[in-house]
Image (cartoon, grey):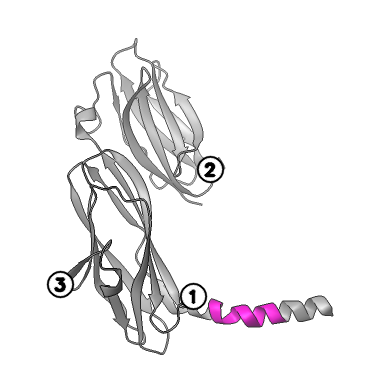
Amino acid sequence: MKKILILMTWLLLMSPLFGTAQEIRVLSENLDFVGAIGGSQRKSILIQNDSDKTKTFYLKNLRGNIGSSQNMKICVGEQCFDAKKDLAKIKLTMNPGEIITDVYVEFDLGIAETRGSFDLFFVNAENIRDAFVVEATYEVSNPVNKISEFDYEDLSLSDVYPNPSNRVAHFDYLIKNRSAVARISINSFIGNPVAEYQLDPERNTLQVNVSEFNPGVYFYTLFVDNKNIVTKKLVVKK
């Protein structure tokens, strides 16, 4: 009986949190900025107020890793704000049932080859427990590292497909310099090694069983003679 009372008390205490978590929904997928050094991209955020109340949210925190040469602005309609400096100025007011479609994130990819992630943490101006998070990742490549999109000096390599993948991911390749040692290394989003495959010059396809991977974002890197040639993203879903 004591355990039942404890469980019922816990559920009563937690029910407001569960309720608010469902009232604001981020309808858009995670923001994903992928491009070359010096580029700039704009992604939209779709947010729905499922509650029966008008709510105002402000950007409380910008959490994650953003480089010193990378700039980010959050635009609400035609008005844009520096996300690093103008946190309190970034506010979203939503009427009951309203879907906001005019919120954008503009992200300058910077001047260095890198990758990382950041979160935009919004809270209700009247109740800090009422909150939602917009997640984002970025991957900045250096076009100098490759001759063309998939054609490198020692080999040709296709992008991974299908991507996202839930069973088997494929790489098509052709090794032009048979004395070159080529391999593909797969790492988790935080950089932990997951798998590594050496490309056989006698074959032209590499198959990777990703059903054994946990769902999430991974990065695969092509090495030729231990030189990092290119890094790209692989998404695994269940």
Residue under circle 2?
213
Q: Residue 120 carries which label?
A: none
Q: Which residue is drawn at 50% across and 49% down?
A: 215
Instruction: Depth check: give the residue in front, 141 or 65.
Output: 65
Residue under circle 1?
21
Q: Can residue 60 be seen in this view?
A: yes
Q: Residue at x 47, y 51 (%)?
A: 237
Q: Residue at x 18, y 47 (%)?
A: 39
Amino acid type of disc 2? Phe
**Element assignment for label 3:** loop
| Mark before the other along the chain sequence, 3 or 1 | 1
Amino acid type of disc 1? Ala
Residue 16 in the image, given as x and y percentages of width and height:
55, 82
Q: Residue at x 36, y 17 (%)?
A: 225
Above or below, comparing residue 193 to residue 179 in the picture: below
What span is in magenta? 9-18
| Mark before the other along the chain sequence, 3 or 2 | 3
When asked about the image quadrant of residue 7, the answer is bottom right
Relative horizontal placement of residue 229, taking residue 80 as reference (left or right): right
Bin the neighbour count of mark 3 within 10 Å (Cα to Cα): few under 14, some 14-19, many 20 and up. Answer: few
